[in-house]
Every structure is written in structure tokens, then in C-alpha cells.
Amino acid sequence: MVSASLRKSITDLSRRRARTGFTVATLALAVASVSFLAIPTLIDRSMQEEVRAGKLADATVTMRPLPLSDEQLGVLEALPNVVAIEPGIRVNARVLVGERRAAALVIGVRDFARQGVDVVRLESGAYPGRGEVLTDVQNANVGVYDGRAGDTARVVGAGGLRIAGEGRNIPGGEEVQNEHLIVLYATADAIAALSGERGYDRLAIRLRDTSRAAETVERVRRYLDTVPGFAGFSRLPEFRAPGDWPGKADTEMFAEFLSVITLLALLSALVLISNTMTTLVAEQTGEIGIMRAVGARRRQIRIVYLRTAVLLGLLGALVGVALGIVLANLLASYFGSMYWAIDVGFDVDSTVLVASVAVGVLAPVLAALPAIRRGVRVDLREALESTGSAVGGQHAGDRLLRRARFLPRTMQIGLRGVGRRRRRNLATALIVALAVANLLAVLSLAAAATENSRTSWSNHLEDLRLWTSGRERFDARALRTIETTAGVARAQPALVSDAELAGEEASVWGVPRQPLFRYRLSDGRWFNAAEERAQERVAVIERNLAQFTGVDLGDRVTLTTVAGPAQFRIIGMATNQQEDGTVLYVPLTTLRSVLDQPTGVSTYWVKTTSPDEALIDRTTTLLDDRLTALGYDVATEISYVMERDEIQENRTLTTTIAVLGFLIVAMSMVGLANAITMSIIERTREIGILRCIGARARDVRRIFETEGVTLALAGWLLGLPLGYALTRMLVWLIWEIAGVRLPVVFPLWNLWIALAGTLALALLVLLLPLRRAVRFRPGDALRYA
Amino acid sequence: MSGSSRRATGAPLIELSGVEKVYRMGKLDYRALRGVDLSIAAGEMVAVVGPSGSGKTTILNLISGIDRPTAGTVTVDEKRLHEMSEEELAVWRGANVGIVFQFFQLLPTLSALENAVLPLDFARRGSKRERFERARHNLQLVGLGDKLDHLPAELSGGEQQRVAIARSLAADPRLIVGDEPTGNLDSVTADEMFELLEQLNREGKTILFVTHDRELAARAQRVVTIRDGVVVAG
């Protein structure tokens, strides 16, 4: 037997099915949004599986191509703490996709059958033999190359290479994803035939104890020092923390942004539930009076409504958790296949599951408390005489609304209706405002990211860059070749090397005093000719890096370079954000001396005779061909293409965030539909009266349309400052989480997009409740209690 | 007691023939009217009486086109209401019937004048100025010329009912129906209200009202008694 008070809690929900449905739907969406937090865990579980299957390296060292015999590799593998060592080589290549030359990376594997680290796993076909390659699954997935097993890869300079099959490799896939390179795998012998590079330029190492990784790598270096031709590591050794995988940090970062969306969704749901409970309690003032009259204590009445809130919560949590599990798995599966070409299996994150249920059940109770408090405190006589919606229109705001006499009467009625349920309508406007704010923030973020990329690339005065990572550095012969190539106006050498500053990854750019690059100083100065000549250890640091590391102008810092530690004096602070703002600019002469490379450079910055894109493309191809013919392993970067790619990538990311942010917009619209439906239900009698005195369907429709649109407009107005605040918060978060400094951009046209979107959606969600409003027969409406 | 002195003239304004009305209440059918035949002449002042649940309000709702009969025909001023659509009925009501409810049913956010002008706005009759002139005139007629801008919440019960009567007069209808029009008023105010209705009747309006008050019913020219959905007298 169910107690009478419990039955009341249940019937309070069942008697207003539409409202209960809306509230449960909103809560379910909010609870489902908590499941976003499970996405990194779901992806991580699959990626850990990938890491195990692919035997991902714990440490990787790179060097100029160095021939190593099986014996020498055996010695390395026998070093303490080493489980396995896999030598490899990477050469740059160009693959013809249609008639277009696309940048490619061919990764050489010593023996496909005996891979111990960074394994290239076969997905289809067979491992490549002589004159064959394997294509990475990510090539087709990312869309850079769709060659399949049996096709022929047309490699510039090497003719056609048969594709023996499809392979999967974590580091290779990362190159496709991050650099948009076509990644192919071949035997090391095939690489030698292709490029003339013999030996290996990297060693991937699996370790027993990763905490001793640096020590083990030092042992490897000491051994390699005994090998003729070894000239030190060309980059700082890469160490993988236990449990880490490529892209994990980005995934976690993305999840942190998603948590902002979750928070906003929860906030919207809380406002809506609070709204619902306020209405529920307010419209039952009479019933509260009756309960009090028949002896109910305040506590007992409170329990009735708290139970209603708990029931709402349970329903919302139930639907939300189910929806969340599906949503999280769908999104994890989408991201898994998009970024790593993996199948993320169906899974449930129990922590997030518990959190979702807790949020689902507790949120409505918390949101209902103020309404219940107000409800039970109402005076008994007043409660029994409760007149419902027959009062109103006497506040200052109402007087203001009454001034809009120029509007048609129906619109006036609708407008004044907004003032009748002040608290609820304010809450509804607030929900819409949160959606508008979210939309504006996402749009602003997209604009900021685009502007950031544009600003960053506008600092590049060069049109293309040439890189070499092969045995041969660019030397005087390379410079002559570049300068005599048709279309080249100017070429400038640069030396780029990775480094570490106070434990943070950094990049050192050795550049001439007047570089083909626009530096923007916020403090201090650029280096002068005397310092350049004297190879002074002075550096201009980018502001972001300075902030991460606590470095200030005038400080002396120790930079860990591939050649060992080196001290620099900070003479300038730049606001540029090259490499996410982690670059130190030093005189080229200085970096040469630090790296002990008196001749040769890794990079040339080239300015063409015209900014015409076709000319830049032609010049790049020409340079590529001429330098490759001379034996240089060349990679090219074209500024306008890089800029375009970066903007496109930003757009993809912000679109993803926007799509997820749409959840909040959906919730706000459910909130608006809820408010209007409630308003219509409450005023059913009023609609009946209007129909009695001659109101036509369109008159009734216009009254409620005006009310809904006014609420949406109020929400839009409230959303503008909120949107600005949220934009600032997200920009701050991006700086805190990702270390990327974005400008606060708040374009005016976004406000109009948000307005158009809000109004269009508002009118759309009003359709159903309005249909209900005009379908009432006056007789039924008048009988409605 | 002069109101009942004027006698009805002319052809029937209202004609109910074999009218039945069944309400579906959950799984049950409730027969509110079981074959009502009723004829009311233009200019009559008719009181409909009967116990609670007898079908009084249902008859009023059918005559004003608020409800539709389940069977039978309802003709008012030669219009066959049972054949009209909801939209046609709304327009017809706005132009031909004035309705006064027990609980006044004014729109709380509109002033007395705006409430009184509303049916004219819906009917889009005349210019804006003419509509307001007409509503102002009606409010003066009911003695509220000095409270045009008051909101319902700022008026007493009697004053609110006067606004409701002024609203019912907006389109100058031939028929005014009242569902317990004085039921929510004290006796003095109720008497004033009734005098107003009598005055309107003297001016040629057909008045039809439902009441529980035997004294008020006695002041009508004709009393129709309903019991269990059937007209038993009048």
C-alpha cells in the first residue's frame, strides 16, 4: 500500500505529463553531458591496448643517419634496463596524388618480421618486399592518401612502388594526423635504394624501468660515441611517461573544455528544475493550504515535494545515464576513429556513472529547495484563498511594459504576460542566456583561433621553408642552388633545434639579426650586430615560455640543448606565438657555436619574387627537385598552405566544441518550450475567455508567440555580457590548460548570428505548445481547473 | 422591480431542438443534457435555474457557441451554431454575444479600458479611436468612467464585474449571457449589477442568465428550470 503523501508526489508528476516530460528530458540531457567526462577514459582504455599491441617505445633517440650492424644493435639491446631496441629511418618523399605532389614520409623498418618496438602491424595485405611499400591506415582515415593494397604509389624520383598492404603504427599515424604527411613503410634496404641514406636515424627503445630512462639513454649515447660516424643526437631524446600515448594530453585538454560545457549544461538544468519546482509549488498553493488545514506539518509538506524532486531526479538520471553511456561511447568511438583510426569498444566508466547518478538525483533536490521553502511558509488563509494567476501587472516593470501601446493588442497581452511570472520567466530567460553565451563564446573562440593563426602567420615574411634532416646539411652549395632557382627572391638560413628550459619543452631558433620574420617585442630588445658577431649567448624569449618557466628580462637561464647545457641571458620578451609561444630567438652565429656546427644549417627561409600562390607552388617544386637531385633529404613547408591548414584544423576543433555546446542550446530550448507550455497550461481558462470574447486562433497564437519571443530576446540580451564573460573565461582556460594565448575577440556579427539563431529556434520550439493553445475548445478550456 | 415589465417581441432569437450533450469524463460518459427543446424570443430576459449539475451552464455554453451539442441543433439569430467551425464561432461570438462570468474573468495585465475594448480589437471593428470611444462609453454606462486605467487587481469585485459587463457590451451584441453573473458579489453589489442587466434588457438586449438565487430568477420575465438535463418548466 502506497502512503497518501507518496501517492501525491507521484500524481503531481503524472497529472502534468508534458511538464514532467520536459523536465526529465532536460535533466537527462544534463546528466548525459556528465558522460563527456568519460570520453578520455574510454579512449585511454583502447589506446592502452594499442600501446601494448604496438609495443610503443619508452624512449626514442634521433641522430643523423648512421649505419649500425646487427652486432652493434645486439650490444645496444644488451645494455642494462633495455628490453628491446628497434632501429628505423625516416626519409622525406613526394607522392603523386592525382597530378599533385603531396609530402610523404617513408619509414624504414629493419625487418618487418622481427619488430621489437614501435611495431608496424599489418592490417591487410602483406609486409612489403623489394620495390614495395605499406600504407598507414591513417592515410585514408585522415584523407591524405587513399592508395590501397594492390595499388601503385607513385613516389617522385623512385617511380611506382606497389602497395603490399595497410599497416598500423602509432608514431607513423601521429605524423599523418599532426603533419598531414602521407606515411609509407618500407624495408630499410628499400629506403637506401630510394634516397641513398644508409643506416638508421632513430632508435626506439623499450625499457624495463622507465624511471631510469635518462640513465639508459645516456648509456646508449656512450656506446654510439664509439661507433664511427655518430655525431651526437640530432634532437633531445623523447621519453614517454608510463601510460602515456601520442595525443593523450590533447584528449585530456579537450575533455577539460568539455567539462565547461558539462558545467553549463548542469547550470541550465538546475535553473530549469528550480523553475519547474517553483511552478509546481506555486500552482499548488491551494493544495498546500488544504494539507495544512487537515493537519499536515511543514516538514511533511516539504517531504511531499522533496519526494517529487527525487522522483524527477531518478527519472532524469535513469534516462540521462542511459543516454550518456550511448553518447560517450559514440563520441569516444568517433574521436578514436577520427584521430587514431582505432575502434573504441563499448565500455562504461563506473566513476562517471556514479557521478551521473549522484548529479541526477541530487541536482533536482537542491534546485527544488528554495521553491519548497517558500511554498511551505505561505500563510494558511492566503493559501486556501489562492487565486492563481488572476493577479499581476502592478510592478514597475509591468508599468513599463504597458507603455508599449503602439503594438497590436494581442502582442501587448503577450508582452505583459512576461511580467506575470517574474521569477519563472527570469529563470527561462537565464536558460536562454546561458545558451546564447555558450554560442557566442564558441563563435568568439573560433574567431580568436583564426585571428591568432592569421597574426602568427602574418609575422612570417618568407613564403616557403626548406628543411633537411638527412646526413647532408644545407651548405654553401645548397644556398647557391636555392638562390639560383627561378622564382626565388631571397633565401635566409636558420638553425632550429629543440631544447628544454626549466623542464619545459622549448625550441631555439638561430636566426640572422634581421630575419625574414617579424618579431614583436613587449619588453627589452632584439640582439645587435656586435652580439651577432661575438656569438654572444643572448636570447629573446617568447612571452608564453617566459611565463611557464618564470623567466624574466635580464635573467640568466640554462638551456638544455642536444649538445648539452648552455647559458643564455634574456635580453628581450616577444609576444609572438611560434610553436605555441615556446621559442627562444638567438643569433644564428651563437646557436652554431652552442651546437658546435660551424657550417651548414637545417633550414632555409625563402621569399619568392611574387606572393602569387601558383608561383610559390612552382618554386617549391623546383627547389625540391634541384636539392633532392644534389642528395639533400628535403622537406618543404609553404606558408599559405600551412596557414590554411591551421585555420581549418582550428575550425574542426571549434566545430566539435560547438556541436557539443549545442546540447546546452537544446536544453535552453526545452526550457523555453517548457516555460511556454506551462504558461499555456496555467492560462487555459484565460485562453477560453479570450476565445469566448472573439479571439481567433491567430490572436491566441500571437499572444503566446510574443511572450515566447520576448523571453528569447531577454535571454539574448542577458546572454551578451554572459557570453563576453564566458569568452574571457575560455580564453583564460585555454591559456591555463593548453598554454596557448588567444586574443579576446568578440565580433559584432556574432551577436546577430546568436540573435537570429535564438529567434528562429524560439519560434520553432513554440510551434507545439502553440498548436496546443489554439486547439482548446472554449468549453473545455473554461472547465479546466 | 421595473426590469420585468418589458415583454419580448418578434421571432425566436434562440432555438434549441432535441439538444443532447455528453461529456466524456475519463472512461465514463456524463449526459449533461438529455434532449432539450427551448425557444427564446428576442428581447426576452430569461433566468435558467436548477440544482448543481443539472445542465444550466451547459445550455448557456451551447447558446454562446462555447460548447457543441452531441446531438440536436442550436440556432441563434438564424445561425446554426452546431454547423460552424471553432474559428467561425469565435468570430461570431465576438460580434453577437456578450458573456459575463461569475468570476469576472478579466485579463489581469490589461486596464479596465483595455479589457473593455478587447472584443472590438479581436473583431477589428472600426478605427482604434472609435473602439476606445465605444469602450469608454460602455464603462461610463456601468459607472466606471473614472477608473478606466485601473488594473483588475485595483478594482473591487463589483467593479470588476462592471468591467466584465462593459466588455460584454463592446460589440453591441443582441444577446448577453451571464453564468451566475452576481454569484460572486455581495447582495448590494449583486442588486446593482442586476439592475444594470435589467436596464440593458429594457434597451432591447436579450438577456439569458444562470442563477441559483431564486429572488433574482423571479425578476426575469421567464424562468427556465432544468433538472437532470431536461427542461422541466418554462
Image (cartoon, coloured by chain):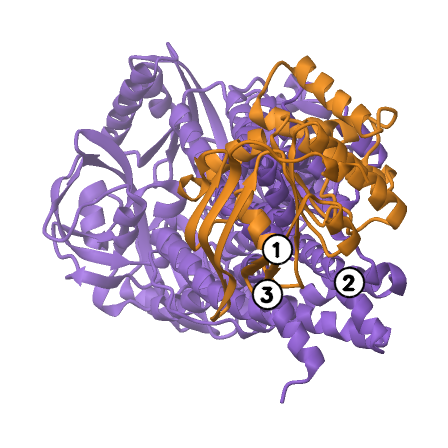
- When the figure is inspected, residue B197 is found, relative to residue A200, above or below; the finding is above
Residue A276 numbered mark, or none: none
From the rendered image, report the letter of the chain displayed in purple: A
Residue found 39% across the figure and 13% down from its top: A611
The type of residue carrying mark 1 is: Lys
Q: Which image quadrant for residue A744?
A: top right
Q: Which residue is mark 3?
A: A15
Q: Which image quadrant for residue A269?
A: bottom right
* Nearest to the observer: residue A374 or residue A333: A374
Given this view, does label 2 or label 1 mark the residue nearer the observer? 1
Given this view, does label 3 or label 1 mark the residue nearer the observer? 1
State the hue of chain B.
orange
Location of residue A704 in the rendering, given as x and y in whole percent from the top left corner: 59, 38
* Image-based side of B200 in relation to A160, left or right: right
- The chain letter under disc 2 is A
* Nearest to the observer: residue A454 or residue B44: B44
The type of residue carrying mark 2 is: Gly
- When the figure is inspected, residue A248 is found, relative to residue A579, above or below; the finding is below
Location of residue B178 in the rendering, given as x and y in whole percent from the top left corner: 68, 44
Q: Which residue is mark 1?
A: B56
- The chain letter under disc 3 is A
- The chain letter under disc 1 is B
* Nearest to the observer: residue A239 or residue A70: A239
Q: Residues within 10 Å of mark 1 (few under 14, many from 20)?
A: many
Residue found 66% across the figure and 63% down from its top: B52
Residue A286 numbered mark, or none: 2
Give me the C-alpha separation between circle 3 and circle 1: 29 Å
Q: Residues within 10 Å of mark 2 (few under 14, many from 20)?
A: many
Element class at badge 1: helix
